[in-house]
Amino acid sequence: VSSINFTPLHDLDGTITPNGLCFERHHSGVARVDPAQHRLMIHGFFDKPLVLTMEDLKRFPRQNHVYFLECAANSGMEWRGSQLNGCQFTHGMIHNVMYTGVPLRLGLEEAGIKPEGKWLLAEGADAAAMTRSIPMEKALDDCLVAFKMNGEALRPEQGYPVRLVVPGWEGNMWVKWLRRLEVGDQPWHHREETSKYTDLLADGVARRFTWEMDAKSVITSPSPQAPITHGPGPTVLTGLAWSGRGTIPRVDVTIDGGITWHEARMDGPSTPKALHRFYYDFEWDGKPLLLQSRAHDSTGYVQPTKNALRAIRGENSIYHNNGIQTWAVDAD
Ligand SMILES: Nc1nc2c(c(=O)[nH]1)N[C@H]1C(S)=C(S)[C@@H](COP(=O)(O)O)O[C@H]1N2
Ligand SMILES: [Mo]
């Protein structure tokens, strides 16, 4: 079954997503994989193709990194207008986890990449056999072959016993139940990089290989599922911001629909390609509010309005909607 559920962002604080609350996206159900039987095959343009057991994998030097995973379709229902009433549904196809894993580079170097090897194919062991082409530059940069999340084994739903971590890039490339890595001299043009996960523009041309997740933010509280339940007075506004290109040094917040903006207070860890937490503590006067947040990332990029995005990308797309989200608060 093709299925999806959503991280309850409105109920969480800090930046780490607890394992049991991570959203799940399965194109063909959850695979049940016996770690003792599981093999990771590394083949193609290599000097010495490898077949690794989980035990083999755990003898490579490992690292720990916190990264967000965002589905490219997150907020995709909102391209033409607002439809979903709650940040869990508009923005909940994201989680932020500390992964323990082996740098993908080490596995590829062990097999010895030939000079013609420019692209990597990653394939999952589920019924969907999820397959994506990844440029070698990224594969050798910061990708991980991960077997732990937040310290414990990956959950079956998150790819137990092993998944690919592709920091800052769209969630679809983070192949779960990873069973095969093939190196070639060009991309494979699989379903998930042609028919799906391409961005159809107004003129009918589709943008392809839009891997990086642009800077984005959302106010998680107050929000439709987490309304203000007290009267006028001190009020805590909080939210999340992230960028596939680096850190988030600054988030702006408005409570009057963009007439006046205030710099939010960042609190918690700030590491590249991970969620950041922001707060804006204000005195509510009991009147209606229009809440928005705007992320700035470490490259200087500023999160656009949805209308600015629509002007460039049209309204056909599902993927890569990183526009500013508005929540309305009524006096009651
Ligand atoms: N093998 C496999 N990997 C997969 C998928 C899948 O269906 N099968 N779904 C992809 C998609 S579209 C996303 S958004 C992420 C979701 O990861 P999660 O289930 O850990 O949230 O996994 C990706 N990796
Ligand atoms: Mo996805």
Image (cartoon, helix red, strand yellow):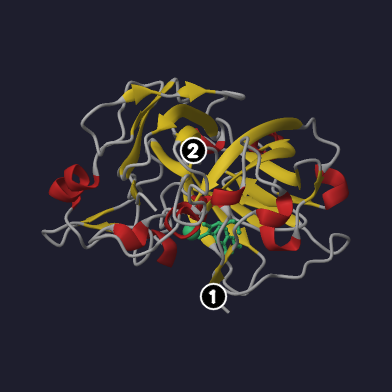
Would you say 258 lies left or right of 35 here? Answer: left
| Label 1, ligand 1: CB separation under 8 Å | yes
Q: Earlier in the sequence, mark 1 or mark 2?
A: 1
| Viewer-nearest residue: 52 or 253 | 253
Q: What's under tag 1, amino acid-wise? A: Ser
What is the x, y in percent for residue 301? 31, 27
| Viewer-nearest residue: 276 or 32 | 276
Residue at which label 1 appears: 2
Q: Is residue 120 above or below residue 77?
A: above
Name the quadrant where ligand 1 sits.
bottom right
Would you say 293 lies left or right of 124 here? Answer: left
The residue located at (60%, 50%) in the rendering is 11
The residue located at (59%, 58%) in the rendering is 23
* Secondary structure category for the residue under label 2: strand
What is the x, y in percent for residue 182? 58, 52
* Residue situated furthest left in the rendering: 203
Within 10 Å of disc 2 (Cα), the crowding (few <14, some 14-19, many 20+) is: many
| Label 2, ligand 1: CB separation under 8 Å | no
Residue at which label 2 appears: 239
* Secondary structure category for the residue under label 1: loop
| Viewer-nearest residue: 227 or 319 | 227
Q: Is residue 162 above or below residue 294?
A: below
Q: Is residue 47 visible to us here?
A: no
Q: Is residue 139 visible to us here?
A: yes
The residue located at (33%, 35%) in the rendering is 255
Q: Which mark is residue 51?
A: none
| Viewer-nearest residue: 307 or 42 | 307
What is the x, y in percent for residue 258? 24, 34
Quarter of the image that includes the N terminus: bottom right
